[in-house]
Amino acid sequence: MSVKVRLTRTGANRDLSFRVVAADTRFPRDGRFIENLGWYDPDKTGKNFELKLDRIDYWKSVGAIVSPTVQSLLKREKRAAAGQPEHTHQKISKGKKAKLAKAAKAAASAG
């Protein structure tokens, strides 16, 4: 039996939400699952997901495959736990980069 940690869709047509589940790969996406491991609501602002990290770690330890979407949610959770910003791929304008470099240079020479 091959287990996968993946999303299963819940909610209405234009009001999507998902559950994070451990399921046998032979079962359909929205079919039977072994264990509910959390939820994800893409329409919600702020913290829009919750995961049971200890149970996900257990399933990974026994050989479960984690889907790419759940992997990105795990990465976001770990960043939040470390106190880092959620998205690190935001671009910084050239002007802002120059100001930051100038401020860092001034701080280094003053210190």
Image (spheres, rainbow, N blue to C red):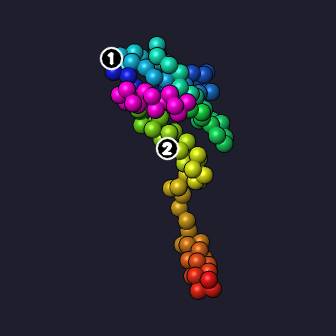
Name which residue lies at 39% across and 18% down. Answer: 24
Residue 73 appears in the rendering: yes
Picture quarter containing residue 107? bottom right
In the rendered image, residue 77 lying in the magenta stretch gets the answer no
> Regarding mark 2 in the picture, which secondary structure is present there?
helix
Name which residue lies at 42% across and 37% down. Answer: 68
Name which residue lies at 59% across and 86% down. Answer: 109
For the residue marked with disc 2, what is the amino acid? Lys
Point out the residue furthest to the right here: 45
Name which residue lies at 48% across and 30% down. Answer: 56
Q: Which residue is mark 2?
A: 75
For the residue marked with disc 1, what is the amino acid? Met
The x and y percentages for residue 51 are 56, 32
The x and y percentages for residue 82 are 57, 50
**From which residue to which does the magenta span run?**
52-65
Q: Which residue is mark 1?
A: 1
- Residues under numbered marks 2 and 1 in contact, where contact means CB atoms less than 8 Å apart: no
Above or below, 18 relative to 82: above
> Regarding mark 1 in the picture, which secondary structure is present there?
loop
